[in-house]
């Protein structure tokens, strides 16, 4: 067990924020993790995956434990489904590639989402018409207080729109160790998402496979989203707000072009549209900015501090509230 002091985290968060961890260690099995948890005693403890959904606003006191538990295995099989268990430190996209290559369907729409398997349930990752929830079966997590391993099924996890029990009541209380997915052996590709459907239609394929879906999602993502290797970011910084229908109908009078998605008695509004209306698209304050093409993505142009990016996000939240009376919520975890 190697514990390092004052460890530089710049390369360990996709925003590329310069900050240090008072103590930093890696674990590649449960026993090592338990040892580190016991060793860290009463100090702060933060679990780090790929660092693609965090904004570090100050040097971190206590322990940062980097998850290196990797592996993928089939744990059960029925006539129509395969149950695939991946260790929490496995790169999410490696799991997607593995399953797509085997012909197991369910997570192909989630291709190329950065980060690790263990972080995927925390915000119930989603993209292109699919969510982790659609394929999730169960997970195992280590309780940080009693060091017991607990099992959570989909119901226990309260997986919602970029949300789960691990962002709420169990925030900071568990380390997710592994995730089991239930995948289809004879998958029917999910092409419900408009831009995906359009791209696939342009290919004029006789039949669409999950591999086509995965490759198309990868192409769209590469063309649309800024690559953190080129410019620091953590993907969408805010969630798309979901508001009451009455409120939406009222807003529509003042903003007749407001885009929206019906969700029964509620309506989802694209946060990117709200932010763009307020002139933040391409806005830059020092090295902290709003991406020129994707206003939902806040970026670090080089030497921004986490606090500067947080301040920019607060200005955006304030302006959106003033102009639309809508409360934007951050998707990224501020630490
Ligand atoms: C370019 C880009 C595009 C993105 N696109 C999408 C997208 O389309 N859809 C989407 O949903 N997300 C997207 N994201 C966000 C991000 O990729 C996901 O949220 C991902 O699941 C984060 O994984 P990570 O391993 O990097 O987590 P980290 O950033 O390392 O951690 C995130 C949080 O989870 C906690 N955590 C991490 N691992 C564990 C564990 N094993 N047990 C307990 N807690 C843990 C951390 O303490 C932290 O609070 C994008 C990010 C980027 C940079």
Image (cartoon, rainbow, N blue to C red):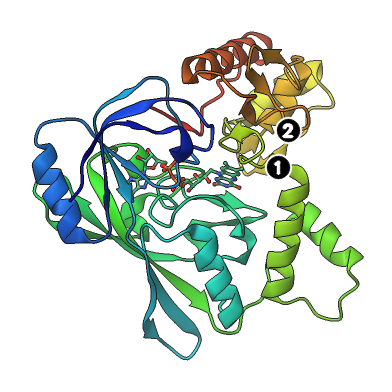
- Distance Cα–Cα, label 1 vs label 2: 7 Å
Instruction: State whether label 2 is within 8 Å of ligand 1.
Output: no
The residue to which callout 1 is attached is 225
Asked if the residues shown at circle 1 and circle 2 are in contact, with their CB atoms under 8 angstroms apart, the answer is yes
Residue shown at the point (58%, 69%) measured from the top left: 97
Residue 201 on image: x %, y %? 87, 66
Q: Considering depth in this image, is 256 or 275 the residue closer to the camera?
A: 275
Density class for disc 1 (Cα within 10 Å; few <14, some 14-19, many ≥20) is some
The image's mark for residue 155 is: none
Q: Quadrant of the C terminus?
A: top left
Q: Residue 190, image x and y in percent?
A: 68, 66
Compared to 3, does 152 lie above or below? Answer: below
Name the spot of residue 198 as percent of width and height, x first. Answer: 85, 58
How far across and down, in percent of the image, does residue 103 sit? 60, 81
Q: Which residue is mark 2?
A: 294
Relative to residue 40, is residue 80 drawn left or right? Answer: right
Write down the quadrant of residue 19 in the picture. top left
């Amino acid at each position: 067990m190697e514990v390092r002091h004052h460890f530089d985290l710049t390369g360990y968060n996709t925003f590329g924020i310069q900050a240090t961890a008072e103590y930093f260690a890696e674990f590649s099995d449960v026993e090592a993790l338990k040892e580190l948890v016991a060793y860290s005693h009463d100090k702060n403890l933060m679990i780090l995956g790929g660092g693609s959904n965090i904004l570090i606003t100050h040097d971190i006191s206590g322990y940062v434990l980097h998850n290196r538990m990797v592996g993928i295995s089939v744990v059960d099989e029925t006539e129509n489904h395969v149950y695939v268990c991946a260790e929490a430190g496995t790169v999410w996209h490696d799991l997607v590639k593995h399953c797509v290559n085997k012909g197991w369907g369910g997570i192909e729409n989630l291709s190329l989402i950065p980060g690790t398997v263990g972080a995927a349930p925390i915000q119930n990752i989603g993209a292109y018409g699919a969510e982790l929830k659609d394929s999730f079966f169960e997970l195992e997590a280590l309780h940080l207080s009693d060091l017991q391993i607990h099992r959570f099924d989909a119901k226990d996890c309260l997986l919602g729109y970029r949300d789960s029990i691990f962002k709420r009541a169990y925030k900071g209380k568990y380390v997710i160790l592994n995730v089991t997915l239930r995948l289809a052996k004879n998958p029917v590709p999910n092409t419900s998402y408009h831009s995906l459907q359009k791209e696939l239609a342009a290919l004029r394929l006789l039949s669409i496979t999950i591999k086509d879906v995965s490759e198309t999602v990868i192409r769209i993502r590469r063309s649309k989203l800024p690559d953190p290797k080129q410019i620091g970011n953590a993907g969408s910084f805010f969630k798309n707000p979901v508001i009451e229908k009455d409120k939406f109908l009222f807003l529509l009078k003042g903003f007749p072009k407001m885009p929206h998605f019906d969700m029964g008695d509620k309506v989802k509004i694209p946060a990117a549209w709200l932010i763009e209306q307020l002139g933040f698209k391409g806005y830059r304050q020092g090295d902290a900015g709003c991406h020129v093409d994707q206003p939902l993505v806040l970026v670090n142009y080089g030497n921004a501090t986490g606090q500067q990016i947080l301040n920019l996000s607060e200005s955006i939240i304030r302006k959106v509230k003033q102009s639309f009376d809508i409360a934007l919520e951050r998707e990224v975890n501020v630490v």
